[in-house]
Image: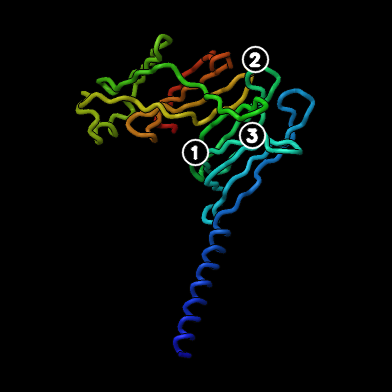
Amino acid sequence: MRKELLFAFTAFFFMSLSAITGAYALENEEQEKILLEEQKDFNGDGKMENMTLTGISSEDEDNFYKKLTIQVSNEKETKADITMDGGYNPNLELYDLDGDKQEEMFLTISDNERNSRKRYQIFDFNGTEIKEVAIPELPVMTSSFKDDYKAELIIDGLKTYNFDLYERKNTYEQLGLYQNGHLNESTELIINPFTSLKPSRYKQKFALEGKQIISGIAAVDKIAYLETVWTSKKDGWKLEKFKVKEISSKTK
C-alpha cells in the first residue's frame, strides 16, 4: 500500500511540477509590452484621449512582436482598439495626412531584423472606432524584357520607360534568360512593394513620399527606383508626381 501511495504521490508531484513549469515558460515566452503611450485630442473637442501601442513579444527574438494593438481610451473607459499582425521594431507616429486638423496614426513595421522589408499602415480614430486607411496604390503598370538585353516599363496612361541592360548580359545569358541576345521566353519585371513611405509636404499640402524598387529576374537584380508623391483626397490618394531612376549594376 505504501509503495502504491508513494508512486501515486510521486506521479502527481511531477505532473504538477510540469504544469507549473509549462505555465511559467509560457508566461516568460510571451509578454505584452507598452511600446508607446501618448495623450492627444484626436477630435478637437478639448478632451484628451490616451493612445497606446502594445505588442506581444517573444523572448526568442529581440524586437519582434507577434501581435500589435492600438488602443484609444479616456480616464473612464476604452473607446476603441484594433489588432494587427506584428513584426520587428514597430514605430507609431501621428500626422495630419489629410489636412483636416485631426491626426492619423502612421505605423511602420519591419518584416525582418535588417529592416530591409517594411510594411506601412495608416489608422484613423473617429471618436468611436479605429479604422484602417488604405495606403497609396500605384496605377496599372505593365513590363517586360525585350530582345538585345532591354526592358520596358509602361505606367498606364502616364509614361513609358526603356532600360538598356547590356551590362548584365553575361549574367542573363548564364541564367538562360537570353541566348545570344534573344529573349528565351516572355518575362516581366518585378515591381516591389514600398521600401520607403514617409509623410512629407507637396505644394503646401500634406503628402506621402514613396519609394519602390523595380527588379529584373530576382529582387536582388535591381534595375530602377520608382519615386512617387501622393496627396490625400476624399476617396483615397492622388498621384502628384513620379520619377524613375535607373540603377547601374556596376554601382549597386
Q: Observer-nearest residue: 146 or 232?
A: 232
| Mark before the other along the chain sequence, 2 or 3 | 3
Residue of label 2: 205
Residue of label 1: 116
Q: Quadrant of residue 148?
A: top left
CB atoms of marks 2 and 3 within 8 Å: no
Q: Which mark is residue 37?
A: none
Q: Residue at x 56, y 28 (%)?
A: 132
The C terminus - image quarter: top left
The N terminus - image quarter: bottom left
Where is residue 243 drawn, in percent x and y? 49, 17
Where is residue 193 drawn, in percent x and y? 45, 29
| Mark before the other along the chain sequence, 1 or 3 | 3
Q: Residue at x 31, y 21 (%)?
A: 144
Q: Quadrant of residue 145?
A: top left
Label 2, residues with CA under 10 Å away: few <14, some 14-19, many ≥20: some
> In the orientation shown, which residue stands out farthest toward the front?
1
* SS under mark 1: loop
Where is residue 227 drawn, in percent x and y? 50, 21
Residue of label 3: 80
Query: What residue type is disc 2 on?
Result: Lys
> In the orientation shown, which residue stands out farthest toward the right?
46
- The answer to whether residue 184 is above or below residue 140 is below
For this view, does 134 lie left or right of residue 150?
A: right
Q: Which one is closest to the eye, mark 1 or mark 2?
A: 2
Where is residue 246 drawn, in percent x and y? 43, 23
Separation of residues labelled 1 and 3 (CA atoms): 32 Å
For this view, does 180 lie left or right of residue 125?
A: left
- The answer to whether residue 89 is above or below residue 9 is above
